[in-house]
Amino acid sequence: MKIRIIPTVLFNKSNCVKGKQFKSWRVCGNITQVIKLYSLRQVDEIIFIDISANKNSINFRLIDEFADECFMPITVGGGVKSLYDIEKLLKVGADRVCLNSSFFYKPEILDQAIKHFGSQCLVLSIDYKKILDKNYVFVDCGETNTKLDLEEYLKKAIDYNPGEIILTSIENDGMMNGYDHKTIYEVNEKFSQNFIISGGMSCSKDIAKIHGKTKIKAYSMSSIFHYTENTPLSIKEELKELGLEVRI
Amino acid sequence: MTIKRCKICILPSSKPDLEFNSNGVCQGCLAYQNRKNIDWKSREEKFKEIIQKYKKNNNYDCIIPVSGGKDSHYQVIKCLEHDLNPLCITASTDKLSELGRYNIENLKKIGVDHIEVSTNPVIRRKINKFTLKTIGDISWAEHLTIFTIPFKFSCSFNIPLLIWGENPQNENGGPLERESEIELNRAWLEEFGGLLGLRVTDLADILKLKKKELELYTFPSSEELKANKTFGIFLGQFFKWDGHKNAETASKFGFKTYEKELEGSIVNYENLDNVQMRIHDYFKYLKFGYDRVTDWCCWHIRRGRLNREEALNLENDKSGKYPSEYLGYSLGDILEEINCTQKEFDEICDAFTNKEIFKCDNSGNLIKNKDKSLIKNF
Amino acid sequence: MNKILVIDYNAGNVDSVIKAVKIFNSNVIFSKNLADLDNCSKIILPGQGTYDVAIKELKENGLYEKIIYKTNKENIPILGICLGMQILSSFGYENNLKTTGLNLIPGKVIKLKDNPSKLPHIGWTSVKFVKTDKIFKDIDSEKDFYFIHSYKYIALDKKNTIASSFYNENFSSIVKYENVYGVQFHPEKSLGNGLKLIENFLNL
């Protein structure tokens, strides 16, 4: 199975943004240019998350516009609260829809959505932070501590059988210091779900390290493409040199 | 994210990397206010300390990357005042205006060695069209080569010290922790150099250009830079920076300004060389809702040359005009050279316009005035 | 008359399929009207969701019989994508039900093996051509296409498998019988090679 390198594009209205540990958000460009560029680069997949949709409403028009640019799979999330939201997102061009906070507040939505649309088009996103040596799940874009332990939360999530789970370390996010491999190894030991790892990627060796020790095949990153000379292709070329299977 | 403006100047929060404090004051203003707390004397001493080391160099003491503009003149004059023996390097702009040529020649007459490095115009124009279409920036290659070319020559000629002008993160309000940096290196370029996520490797990959054809667009390797002990510094971190004052200084040395107010600006003494500049600046407006007019208003406000109300009026009056001409060149002529039709250009403009900050009709289409200008909704 | 019909049977994200087809032929309609089946030159059957629900939808709209008629009796070319490919089979065994399919390419659809790698199979996987076909024009064998599925198609007649891939086991990635094609991957999401395949189908 080839490793998937998946850029995550966070946006707030028409601006592409990036933060550090879910804070200090910087506008890093106009979203049209970011999408056109990734599209031209023919990346494996893109994850789009609207970080403001939780407090406002989903910008279907914008998503429709940028879905038109993409001939690779796109996963769209941010503020998804109802079956109507999911249906409309799929209609405007999302291949998969991502749920985050709504699973915490209304878990039955995932169940209903899977029954209605199939697990293939549903992805669950879980953000977590370490507090006193334990990982806790946070929702509302990192603002609300659910006080639930990550593993407990995962156990519950897996019962619902989402197609894939995006696991993001809030502490590592945007820091470009490597993924949270300790937690990732633990999760990999206990759960055999399809995971996408996110938060902290700094170079291709970060991926090689985790790939060598786990079954994880999908990796997401954001900051390194906004702020360093790395591109999705350069990362893949380096991974290929390290002996990993990628699509080039 | 409702667009808010700085309480002191008028920069909007839609500007990338602009930070505000809890009083709604932007980092650009805070950095400027902080200048009075800066011990400029000791900064100058620090500058002298740094250059002392490099005066021991075998050949030139430093490279000054220059465009021939007001800031370039100021940088050269300042360096000569400090007894430096510089090599001035100009990374040629794609379409150099007559006035731009005049000013480059004038700069040389101050008394410096000068190299002008131009990229293959056929490839350059291909790249310019591509970047205009893909990332809405006709000047991407320009912004890259004004850094890569001097760094390349720094390594090839063994001139480790490069003296740049202002630190834009300080001057224009970048992330808090970065505004006092004195060094310009590759990491800085990737993050703040205006590359908009596009990288040279993308050009090779997407435009099918050979790596060899992109030599001047490619940064030297980290090994080369290390071996050369390359060190790029911002002059603006050691001496109080003021673009307007730089123009006055430059004029005393023969620098020529434009005969009238520049189109799309409120001054006549900057960006006189690059004919495509107007298009570049227009896209900034389409994406973020502000342009050079806004920038100048803010610089003037901070230095007490304009008050906020005057600035808002001026911006309202002069900002956001469709780029029909610049420095006497028509848009049609400029576009023809990069093989772009007027229709294509307008489509590209629309594709990059941020619909959250400009008024749209009920069908989601942008509302345009007769002169093709848009209407801001903040 | 060169009208392409993309069948509407509530099968998830069809926007991408329509967008991809439009690149090559702007005369595309997205419909569940039986009348539109009469006027088209080619049919595309997209698909996301489950086998039983998909067949139920087709039957409720009267499309089930008409599609079979058009392809068998009038030889209208049809391309089934992902679930759309799977329902071309005789039977599907999703959701613990046995559902009768369109039976346009005899075979059955059962769950993929789920180890060592977890299901669904998501990602870019190599598609190896095992026969030559017009639909492969200008596409190299063993190129990657995008898959997302948990079920596989087992063609009754091995000759009907014209390309195969591997995920925990070998499975048919493309099936074909005369004017009927089924692709397990999403060509509309597989960048250049996927778009080429769609173009080739439209040019048949």
Image: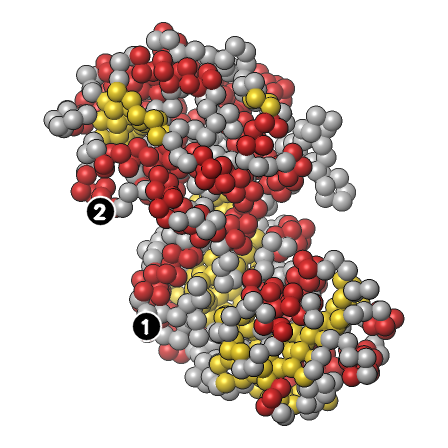
Q: How is the image coloured?
A: secondary structure
Q: SS class of the residue under badge 2? A: helix
Q: Which residue is mark 2?
A: B223
Can residue A133 be seen here? The reply is no
| Marks 2 & 1 on one chain | no
Q: Which percent across, then down, holds residue B256?
A: 43, 11
Query: Badge 2: few (under 14), some or many (20 or more) residues near its Cα, within 10 Å?
Result: few
Discs 2, 1 touching: Cβ within 8 Å: no
Query: Badge 1: few (under 14), some or many (20 or more) residues near its Cα, within 10 Å?
Result: few
Instruction: Please name the residue shown 35% across and 39% down the image.
Output: B216
Q: Which residue is mark 1?
A: A212
Label 2: chain? B
Instruction: Please name the residue shown 23% across and 37% down the image.
Output: B155
Instruction: Please name the residue shown 72% across and 35% down the image.
Output: B367
Q: Is residue C136 above or below residue B365?
A: below
Relative side of A239 to A75, left or right = left
Q: Which percent across, then down, holds residue B136?
A: 54, 40
Between marks 2 and 1, how big is the CA–CA gap? 29 Å
Amino acid at the residue labelled 1: Gly
Quarter of the C terminus of chain A within the rendering: bottom left
